[in-house]
Image: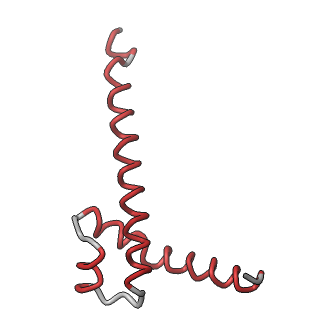
Amino acid sequence: MAEGDYFKQALGDFIRNFAYGDEIKKLVKRGYDTDRIVREMAYPLSPATIDKMVQKAKAELESEAAADTEDSSSDSGSSWEKG
């Protein structure tokens, strides 16, 4: 891939993520899947692009949930509670 093509693709990905990434993540959090988003939302994105964003959102949400679980388990023995 030529350098100019790489830049155009990267810029396009950035713009799509900026414009639609948070909204798609909110929909995934509410239980929407790729098919439902494609069917019900009027995003000017291909189904493949939406699916890629849905998979990314699911991975981020799983990672956040795992981090929250770790944080809550380490908070149980806080020093201020012992004081």
Determine which quarter of the picture holds residue 75: top left
Q: How many marks?
A: 0
Q: Quadrant of the N terminus?
A: bottom right
Residue 61 vertical placement versus 74 (above, below): below
* Residue 53 in the image, given as x and y percentages of width and height: 42, 71
Q: Is residue 12 left or right of residue 8?
A: left
Q: What residue sits 36% from the left and 40% below the top?
A: 68
Tell me if residue 31 comes above or below residue 7 in the rendering. Answer: above
72 in relation to 39, above or below: above
Is the residue 44 above or below the residue 28 in the image? below
Which image quadrant for residue 77? top left
Which residue is painted at 37% across and 42% down in the image?
66
Colour scheme used in the picture?
A: secondary structure
Where does residue 70 sit, x and y in percent of width and height? 38, 33
Farthest residue, direction right? 3
- Residue at image point 29% right, 66% down: 28
- Left or right, 50 with respect to 18, comes to left
On-image quarter of the C terminus? top left
The picture places residue 54, in percent across and down from the top left corner, at 37, 69
Image coordinates for residue 23, horizontal then vertical, percent: 36, 73
Of all residues shown, which one is farthest toward the top? 83
